[in-house]
Amino acid sequence: MVVTCVFFRRTADQHVRLNFNDVGKDVDRRSYERIYDVVHGIPRNPMGRTGIAARGLLGRWGPNHAADPIVTRWKRTPDGTVVEHFGKCVLEFVAIQRRDSLEWALPGGMIEVDETISNILRKEFCEEALCSQNATQEERQLMSERLEQLFTNGIPVYKGYVDDPRNTDNAWIETVAVNFHDDTGRILDDIHLKAGNDACDVQWQEVSGHVKLYASHVLMLKQVADLHAAFY
């Protein structure tokens, strides 16, 4: 069911028409989960109440779509042997430390107007984990070549609601998480990880059930471990 609502801006007499559960001119307000209720012109969080009304810190009413790249490789010893725990190979993934909360997280971001999921996955990884905006022309060229290899065959591992602390009763985050696996471990071998503006650190971390991550990111890691029959 498509519900059209009018929201008036506080700063002008102009009004904005929002099409909930539908694709508007610039914004896709459909949920990956289900058709959500719209009560008195306000969308309701399909996962229940949070205790916080309105949009809070989020930019849009209803679903705020994000994309999270999960870049992985096999953990190896100095001689190149893949590390095993309890008979299963161990994965590593690229994690960033968020500057706002200091929590470790996947290097993802919000999907803006006119951006595709594939573009935002690559863009966010470049900006948050490689600090591409501050790289030299030569470094950017190397990044582009390597990421062209890495991001060619991504496998979606999750699509849906994210249990994020910014969610409210009327605005929430949903994401698409895609795994990009470097089976040889050589694609990013000579590219230095460097935290971008929204992060204060970036590093390879071991995939396991003991890792502490922001929001629902640890659940996405579990999907990646299952995908590769790896240790978790």
Image (cartoon, rainbow, N blue to C red):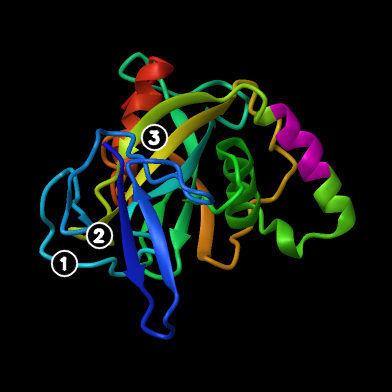
Asked whether, in this view, residue 149 is left or right of residue 216, the answer is right
Q: Which residue is mark 2?
A: 165
* The C terminus, quarter of image: top left
Residue 143 image point, x, y percent: 77, 44
Q: How many marks?
A: 3
Label located before the other in sequence (1 or 2): 1
Magenta part of the chain: 142-149
| Magenta region includes residue 87 | no
Residue 172 image point, x, y percent: 29, 53
Badge 1 density bin: few <14, some 14–19, many ≥20, Cα 10 Å: few
Q: Are marks 3 and 1 in contact (CB under 8 Å)?
A: no
Q: Which mark is residue 52?
A: 1
The amino acid beneath tag 1 is Ile
232 or 165: which is nearer to us?
A: 165
| Magenta region includes residue 143 | yes
Tag 1, which secondary structure? loop
154 or 142: which is nearer to us?
A: 154
Residue 122 lies in quadrant: top right
Instruction: Give the farthest residue toward the bottom.
Output: 11
The amino acid beneath tag 2 is Pro
Badge 2 density bin: few <14, some 14–19, many ≥20, Cα 10 Å: few
Badge 3 density bin: few <14, some 14–19, many ≥20, Cα 10 Å: many
Can residue 74 be seen? no
Tag 2, which secondary structure? loop
Tag 3, which secondary structure? loop
